[in-house]
Image (cartoon, helix red, strand yellow):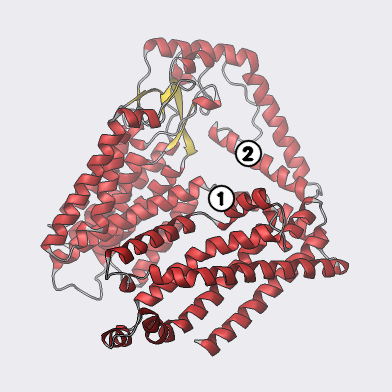
Amino acid sequence: MITALLTALLIVGFVWLSRGSGRRLGLIGAIGLIVAFVALPFVDVIGARTDQNLAPTALALSALYPLLWLAPLLGLVAFLVTLRVSERNSGVLLALSGAVGLGVAFAFQQGPDSFLSLRPVPGVLEVAFPLALAAAIFLLTLANAPDRRTRRVNLAVTVLLPLALAVFLFSPLGARLFPNDPENNITRLRGYYQVGQSVTPQQSGLIVSDWALDVKDYLQADIQKRAQDWKDTRAKLSAPAAGTDRAKQRKDYYDLLDEFNLQRRTPGDVTPVPTTIRAPQDMPPGFAPGPAASDAGVRRVIARSQEYGFQTWVLFATLALGGGLIALFRRRLLVAADPVLERRSELTSAATLALVVTAVAAGFHSTGFNFRDLWVNWPWITDFFSRATPPDAAFLSDVMGAMLITINIALIGTVVAAVFALPLSLLAARNLTQNTWLTRSFYFITRTFFNVDRGVDTLILALILVAAVGLGPFAGALAMAIHSVADLGKLYSEAIENAEQGPIEALESAGAPGTSVVRWGLLPQVLPLFLSYTLYRFEINFRVSIVLGFVGAGGIGFLVNETMRGGQYPKAMTALIIIVLVVNILDFISAAVRRRLV
C-alpha cells in the first residue's frame, strides 16, 4: 500500500509542478475507483484449505461492508457532472471521492475480519467482457471519428463485435470452451464472479464448533511453534551466514512477520487463544474457519491481507484527491477556447489512462513484481558475485570460441533473412500491389505470413528446430533467419510504402517494365534504409542468439548455462564480461557503419 501511495503522490506532484490538468488527473482516479470496485480483487478471503481461498472484488464484499460503495458512487457523480460544471466544482467532487476512498480503505484495513458465504452471480463475466470490448473500441475509434460516415461505421463495429462476443459466450459452444470444474465446484466463466452474503445460523454454529476442535487439535501448538520460529529466525539473522542461507532467513523472517500482522499479534506473542467462543465474531483475527464450516461455504475476510486491487484503489483514490485539489486551488497556464470540447477530451483520455493503469497494475501482480523479494534475496546476488570473482582467465579461449559461434549465428540468420525479406517486402508493399486482384491477393498473403511469423518467438522456433535438427548452432541460425524474415520484411515494406512516388510514376508513364521501375525508381530511395534496418536487426539478433544457447542452440549462451548449472561461477563471470564487451563493440561498429551508409 505504501508503494501505491508514494507513486500516486509523485504523479500528483509532477502534475502540480507542470501546471497540468488537475481535473483530468482527478477523473483518472475517479474512473479508476469505479473499475477497481467492480473488477479488481480487493482482499483475501480464506477457508480451511488453500484451494478454498479467493480474492473477491470490493463489489462482492459490499453487502458486508456497505461503506465501500461511497467512493465509486462519488467518483461516478463527478464523472457525470464534469460536462456541466466548472473545473473548480469538479475539483470539489473529485477531491471528496478521493478522500472518502482513502478513508474507507484505511477503515476497512483496521476493521474486523468478517465471515461470509459466497454465491455465484451468473452472467456477469459474459456481459462484462463484451462491455469492456465495446468501451475499448469506443475509446480507440468512435471518440475520435473525423466525419459522420466514419462515426457510423465505428458505431456499427462498437455494437456488433461486442454483441457477437456476448452471443458466443452465452452459447453452448462458449459453455464447452469454458467447462465446469467439478473439483472446486465452480466454472471457469459462468458463475465465476461471486458476491458475499451473511452466514446463516447453521453456518455460525459450524464456525463455533470447528473452533473448539481446532484449538484442541493444533492451534495452540501452532502459536507456540510460530513464536519459537520467530525467536530462532531472529537469532540466525544476528549471526553470520552465507548468502543463500541469509536469503532464506530473511524470507522466513518476513513470512512470520506477515503471519503475526494478519493475526494482529505482536511478533513472538505466545498469548493463547480462547478455547471456546460463543459467536463467530469472538474468533481472533486472521484465523480461517474450520473444515466443516468451510465445506458448508463459509469464508473469512482477512482485512489486512491486501490484494493488488486494494493497492490500486489507494492509488486511484490518491490521484482523485490530488487532482481534485489541483483543480480547486490552481489555475492552468493554458485555457481551451472550447470548454465543452476540452471536457470531453479530458473524459476520454482519463478513461483510457485509467484502464491503462488498471492493466499495468494487473501486470505487476501477475508477474509477481515485488521490491521486497528483491531485497530479501539480495544476499544471494552478492554471494554469487563474491564466488564469481576473480574471473577465470584460463577459460578465455573457450569463451572466445563460443562468442565467435554466437556472432556467426546472428550474422547468418540476419543475412539469410534479408535475402528472403527483400523480394517478400515488394509483395507486402501496398503501393506496388494495388493494381490487380492478383497482386492484392499476394499482398494479403504476404502480410498474413509476416504477422504469423512475428507472432512466434525466436526462442520457441529454436526449441522446435533443436528437436528437429539436433543441438548446435544450425538450429539457432535457422530459427533466427525464420523469425527475422518477418521483422525485416515488414520494415522493408513500410520503407517502400513511404518512398517518393514521383520517380516511380515517371518510369511507369514512360513504359518502363516493372523490374526497371523497382531498380531505378525505388531501390535507390530505400536501399540506405534497408541497410540501416538490417544492421539494427543484426544487433538485436546478436543479443537474442545469446539466449538461444540456453535451449541448446549453441554459442556462448550454451556455455554460460553449463557453467552456471555446474557452479563454475568464475568461468561464468568471464563469459559475462566478454558478452558485455562484445555487445558494446558491435554497437559502436554498427553505428559507425550506419553513419557512413545512410
Tell me the SS state at disc 2.
helix
Q: Residues within 10 Å of mark 2 (few under 14, many from 20)?
A: few
Residue 432 as seen in the image, left or right of residue 334: right
- Given this view, does label 1 or label 2 mark the residue nearer the observer? 1
In the rendering, at what x and y percent does residue 51 appear? 52, 26
In the rendering, at what x and y percent does residue 106 appear? 41, 42
Looking at the rendered structure, the kind of residue marked 1 is Asn
Residue 230 as seen in the image, left or right of residue 76: right
Residue lying at 56% horizontally and 17% vertically, measured from the top left = 274
Front-most of 558 and 365? 558
In the rendering, at what x and y percent does residue 213 appear? 58, 11
Tell me the number on the disc at residue 578: none
Instruction: State which quadrant residue 594 falls in.
Output: bottom right
In the rendering, at what x and y percent does residue 34 appear? 29, 45
Front-most of 423 and 49? 423
Alpha carbons under labels 1 and 2: distance apart: 14 Å
Residue 521 as seen in the image, left or right of residue 69: right
Tell me the SS state at disc 1.
loop
Instruction: State which quadrant residue 550 falls in.
Output: bottom right
Residue lying at 47% horizontally and 40% vertically, measured from the top left = 306
Residue lying at 26% horizontally and 65% vertically, measured from the top left = 329
Q: Vertical placement of 244 versus 262: above or below?
A: below
Q: Which residue is mark 2?
A: 255
Task: Judge whether residue 472 can be spotted in this image.
Answer: yes
Tell me the number on the disc at residue 370: 1
Front-most of 34 and 65? 34
Residue 404 as seen in the image, left or right of residue 302: right
